[in-house]
Image: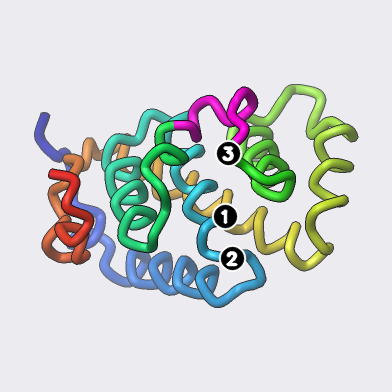
């Protein structure tokens, strides 16, 4: 597989602004471990190898346990996630693959019991951001691991 287009070199200002948007999410109301779960689950669903590779490595660097990383794909059956994390994963899934009838009340209510209105808003922006990155990297066939050194992901020691 080879990369089709390098969005950074072709649209540097847009790329820079999108990175800035992502950086704002890091200082938002959602804790980093949940942001990692969101990024990983959306990337799994969208088949984005580059983002999945990157976010698993970032989560590992930030102390996420390996077994939990393996269980993200089976979070409903796993006992390793808190109710708050489960709500975030459910919200990620429903916003990543929007149902024809919209977001079911049951999922929204589950999220509402775990997150404040600001947190729901911030969480939604996080889901929006990773879905945007997934679409760029899937469309342009960005090679997984190709930016490890640039992003310091070699520190994850998962190669």
Coloration of the structure image: rainbow
Residue displayed at 83% across by 41% down: 110
Q: Nearer the viewer, mark 2 or mark 3?
A: 3
Tags 1 and 2 touching, CB below 8 Å: yes
Q: Is residue 59 above or below residue 15?
A: above
Q: Nearer the viewer, mark 3 or mark 1?
A: 3
> Residue 34: which numbered mark, if any?
1
How crowded pointer 3 is (Cα within 10 Å; few <14, some 14-19, many 20+) is rated as some
The residue lying toward the viewer, choosing from 28 and 8, is 28
First along the sequence among labels 2 and 3: 2
The residue lying toward the viewer, choosing from 32 and 18, is 32
Secondary structure at badge 1 equals helix
Q: Which residue is mark 3?
A: 80
Residue displayed at 29% across by 35% down: 49
Residue displayed at 44% across by 43% down: 40
Is 97 positioned to the left or the right of 65 in the image? Answer: right
Is 159 positioned to the left or the right of 53 in the image? Answer: left
Q: Which residue is mark 2?
A: 31
């Amino acid at each position: 597989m080879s990369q089709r287009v390098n969005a950074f070199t072709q649209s540097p200002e847009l790329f820079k602004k999108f990175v800035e948007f992502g950086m704002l999410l890091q200082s938002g109301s959602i804790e980093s471990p949940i942001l990692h779960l969101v990024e990983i689950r959306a990337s799994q669903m969208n088949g984005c190898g580059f983002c999945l590779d990157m976010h698993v490595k970032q989560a590992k660097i930030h102390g996420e346990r390996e077994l939990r990383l393996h269980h993200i794909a089976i979070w409903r059956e796993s006992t390793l996630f808190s109710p708050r994390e489960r709500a975030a994963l459910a919200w990620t899934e429903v916003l990543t693959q929007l149902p024809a009838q919209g977001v079911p009340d049951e999922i929204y209510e589950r999220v509402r019991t775990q997150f404040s209105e600001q947190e729901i808003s911030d969480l939604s922006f996080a889901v929006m951001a990773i879905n945007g990155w997934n679409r760029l990297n899937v469309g342009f066939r960005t090679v997984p691991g190709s930016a490890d050194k640039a992003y310091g992901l070699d520190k994850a020691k998962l190669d």
